[in-house]
Amino acid sequence: MNFPDPCNAVAEAAELGCVIDHLRDVVFRIDGLGSWRFLNRAWTDLTGHALADSLGSDFLQHVHPLDRDGAEARFQRFMAQAQEPLRHRLRLLRRDGSFVWVEASLRQVLDAQGQPLGLTGTLADVGERLRTEEQLRLAATVFNGAGEGIAVTDPHGRIVDVNAAFEAITGYRREQVLGRNPSVLSSGRHDKAFYQAMWAELVDKGAWSGEIWNRRADGALLAELLRITAVRDAQGRHTHYVAIFSDITGLKRQQETLERLAHYDALTGLPNRVLLTDRLEQLIAQASRRREQLAVCYLDLDGFKDVNDAWGHAAGDELLVQAAERMRQVLRPTDTVARLGGDEFALLLDHATSEAMVFGVAERVLAALGEPYLLERCSARVTTSIGIALYPQHGHTPGHLLRNADQAMLRAKRLGKNHACFVTEDEMGVSERERHALALRQALHAGELLLVYQPKVDARTRRPEGVEALLRWQHPERGLLSPGDFLVQVQGLELECEIDAWVLEQGVAQLGRWAREGVALSLSINLSASALLQPQLAERVAGLVAEHGVPPGRLELEVLETAALADLSAVVRTMEGCARAGVSFALDDFGTGYSSLHYLRQLPVKTVKIDQGFVRRMLSDAGDMHIVRAVIGLAGAFGVRTVAEGVETASCAQALTELGCDALQGYGIARPMPVAALAQWLAAQGDGA
C-alpha cells in the first residue's frame, strides 16, 4: 500500500504559495466574520498596506466609505445562502488615502457539512479599464453630439462611421455611406489636381484643411470648411482618417452676393464705378499697345429728378432699369455701359476709330434714351446730356478721362441738354471743379457751412440712441444744399480735408456740450478717404475728445468701404489709435463697395450701415431684400451692429426689426434738424433733452 509522501505535499504547497504570491491579481480569503484570513503579495502592491497589518482586520475598513454599506449587504447575503460566484465592483482605500477601483470575484468556502465558512476570490485592478471606458463614452458623446459633421474612413478611404451631424448636413443616412468612398459627395467643381494636392499634403503632413464644395444627397451644392486628420498606430502607419466639417454654404452665398455688389450695380446689374475703372485701365493699356483711340462717355439723364419727385423712387428705379437695357441694345458687345450712381452712367467705346464714329454712337444713345418710358404708374420722357473724352487726346488715366468727360457733359447741359459734346481745350485747363472749390472755400471761411443732426433709434424699442452729424451749405443764392450738391466736386482736393477737420471739430464740440448737459447721445461723423488716410488723424481725434470732455463710446466715425481699402494697413493703424481714445468706427453704405469678408475681418469696425437704396426697395424687390438679409446675417456672424439708412415707412422699419437689424435711421424716424429742434424732438420722445 502506497502512502502520500509528506515531503512532496509540503513542496507542492510551497510551490503553489509561490505561484499565488506572483499573481498580478489579489487572492484573498475572508472568514465568516468578515476578517481577512489570507492575502497574497499583490495586496501590498495594489493598496500599499502591509500583509501583517491587514490580516485579521475587518475587510470593510479597507473599503471606500461610499461603498461600505453595499459591500456589507452583499457579504451578508452571500454568507446566508449558497449562490453562484459573484462579481462586484467597489473602491478600496490605499495606504496614502487614495482609492482604487477593483472587480471582486467571490465564491463561498464550505466546511465538510456544506456550511459556509467564509469567502474566497480575487481582486483585479480595473481603474485603467474604467478610465478607458469613460474616454470611449466621452468620445462617443462628442462624436454623436458634435455640431460639425464627422466621417471616419479606413486607410483605403472607405467610410467606417459617420455621426448624426454628417447625416443632417449631407442628407445621407449612415447606412447609405458605410463602406463607400467620400467621393460620393463630390460636386464636380474641383479637378483631379485639387484632390491630388489634398492627398499629397495629407500623407506628407498628416492633416489637410480648407474650403471644399461637395453635394448633398438631394443634389444641392454644399460648401464645407473641412479638416482631415490622419490617425497613426504605434508603428506610425495610417490606420484611419477623420474628416470634420462645418456647413458654410449660407456664409459663402452671402459672400458671393456681397462680392458681386463690389463690382455691379444692384438695381440695373450694370458694372459699377469700381469695375468701370478696372476695365478702363485695361482698355487704356491695350489702346496704348495698339496705338488706337478709345472713348469715354459721361451721361446724365435730364429731367430724371422730376420723375422721382412726381411719381416716387419706384418709378425712377424702373426708368433707370429700362434706360440701362436700351444702352445695352445700342452698344456693341465689346463696349461697356456702367452706372456711376443716381442717374449718371458711363460708356467705354473700344476701337474708337474716329470722332465721327464716336459721335454716331452718342447720337444713337440720345435717340434711344429719348423715347418715352412706359412705367407701371405713368409714362415719362427724359433726355440725356453726354460728354465725350478720347484717349489719348483728353487724358491718360481713368480718373483724368472721366473728369474731363464730366466737364464736357456739364457743357452739354448748359447748351440746352439732349446734346453730346467732346472735351475742349478750355475744359482741360481751369475746370469748373476748380472754380467750385474756390467758391466752397470762401463759403467755409464765411460761415455758410453748418451741421444738422439726424436721429437713430433702437430697432426694437424705438428709443433714441444717437444722431448722425450731416453737413449743409447755406448758399446765398441756391438755398440750403446737401453734400451731394457740393462735396463731390472737391473729392481728393486739400479742401476736402479742411472741411472734414471743420466738421470733426464742430461735431465733437457739440458732443461735449451734450455730455455736460447730461444728454447721453452718441454722435456719428462722416470722414472722407483723404481725412482717413492722414497719419495725424488719430492724434487729432484723441486731442479733440480730451479737450471737450467726450465720454468713451460716444463718438463714432463713419467711413466708406472704398475709403477704408485705399491703404488697409494705414487705415487699421488709424482706427486702432482712435479706439484707444474711446472712438469707434462704422462702415457707411455697406454693400455698395467691396464688401469683402477678408476686409471685414481686418477692419476694427463695430457698425455697418446698410445703404439706403437697398432699404427703400427691400419690400418691393426680392433681390434687395436678400441683400439686406445677407448684410445683417454677415454682420451678426462677425459680432458687428447694423444700422439701416433710408427707413421711410413703418412697414419697412418692422421688417428690418424682424430681420435682426439693430438700429434705424431715415425720414420715417426723423429728418435731419438743427440742435434746437433736436432738443424738442428728444423731449417729445421722453428723453428729457
Image: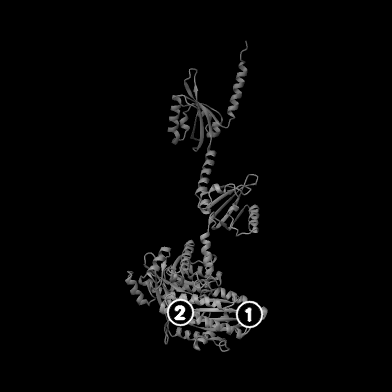
Residue 351 image label? 1
**Front-most of residues 607 and 395:** 395
**Front-most of residues 631 and 310:** 310
Q: Residues within 10 Å of mark 1 (few under 14, many from 20)?
A: some
- Percent x, y for residue 686? 32, 69
- Percent x, y for residue 581? 47, 69
**Front-most of residues 528 and 326:** 326
The residue that mark 2 highlights is 483
**Front-most of residues 567 and 315:** 315
Dot 2 amino acid type: Pro
Q: Could you tell me which quadrant the N terminus lies in? A: top right
- Percent x, y for residue 624? 47, 68
Q: Could you tell me which quadrant the C terminus lies in? A: bottom left
Residue 21 visible? The answer is: yes
Q: Residue at x 63, y 12 (%)?
A: 2
In the rendered image of this protein, does residue 286 appear above or below residue 62?
A: below
Give the secondary structure at mark 2.
helix
Is disc 2 in contact with disc 1, using a CB cutoff of under 8 Å?
no
Judging from the image, the colouring scheme is one colour
In the rendered image of this protein, does residue 107 appear above or below residue 215?
A: above
Q: Residues within 10 Å of mark 2 (few under 14, many from 20)?
A: few
Residue farthest to the right?
290
User: As drawn, is 348 to the left or to the right of 521?
Assistant: right
Disc 2 versus disc 1: nearer the observer = 1
Mark-to-mark CA distance, 2 and 1: 38 Å
Q: Residue at x 34, y 74 (%)?
A: 679
Dot 1 amino acid type: His
For marks 2 and 1, the one nearer the N-term is: 1
